[in-house]
Image: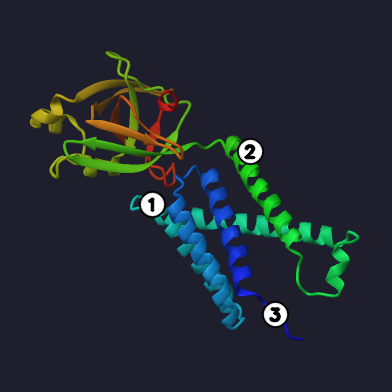
Amino acid sequence: MQQTVYGDLLFLINFSMDFLCLFLVAKLLSRPMSPFRFVLAAALGGIYSVLSLFLPQSGLFAILDILFCAVICSVAFASREDSWRSMLTLCAAHLLSSVLLGGIMTAIFVLLNRLSPPLDELGQSTDIPPWILIAVALFSAFTSLFGGRFLHKKAKRRTFRLEVRLGGRKATCLAFCDSGHLLRDPLDGRCVILLDSGMASLLLPADRKNVDLSSIQNTESLARRVRIIPVKTANAESVLYALRPDCILLKDEKQTHTVDALVGFTEFGGALNECKALIPPELVI
């Protein structure tokens, strides 16, 4: 049995699906949304869907699909600060959203096929009426939009893009907003942002990898910026040496704003996955 496939229609459907999936992933994972990068990634997905018609259907085809999913996510989201774990999370979220939207569209089409005319015209023609495609597309768009917002609000995890500048150096990473993070400077009340100790090499001079007492005493430019923050936990009391940077930018999917805070370094040990910083809720607008 010969089947006719319209390449332009297949491209349009897959372009729309990929764009909606990328939008849903951005909402779920609190990632910045770039319309240009989203359109480019969705266009690549549409082109791949057409080219896949000419590829042999085998077990390797599923592996190729996963690899191309990684390409789409890289084009849409990847930055120099992303690790392989964060990219793996993005790919998994994109695959799950694709399955979700594909299942919704299939369920709608099966439901519409059970109705009476005008669907009876499908008996004489293999072409799908345009109004069915439009209805399915609109329903999928609204499902992605409101479903993404709902899941985004329900998500306990709130991540932001953090950028810290100090003495001509810059460090950027994903930051996690922790409601239990209450560290403040006792003198002026500034909040303290905790960075993973591995980020110290991006902000400090080459010979000052850690903020300790010796580096503070021997580096006059840093000494003027240092604040001593008392830290009290359930088991002990200690102090944390924090720095006052030149600028701190906090970015979410809608806006970027400057925050007035200090930064300190600690060892997270992978506890925050791809996030490399903890920010207090007071800094989130």
Question: Residue at the location (42% across, 35% down)?
Answer: 255
Percent from the top left, x then y, of residue 73?
47, 58
Nearest to viewer (mark 2 / mark 1): 2
Which of 232 and 107 lies nearest the eye of the viewer? 107
Can I make out residue 95 in this image?
no
User: Which image quadrant for residue 161?
Assistant: top left
- In this image, 11 relative to 189: left or right? right
Say which label, 3 or 1, has the lower sequence index.
3
In this figure, which residue is indicated by the disc labeled 1? 82
- In this image, 36 relative to 198: left or right? right
In this figure, which residue is indicated by the disc labeled 3? 4
In this figure, which residue is indicated by the disc labeled 2? 150
Task: Indicate the secondary structure of the residue bearing disc 2.
Answer: helix
Percent from the top left, x then y, of residue 86?
45, 52
Percent from the top left, x then y, of residue 209?
19, 41
What residue type is disc 1 on?
Asp
What residue type is disc 2 on?
Phe
Nearest to viewer (mark 3 / mark 2): 3
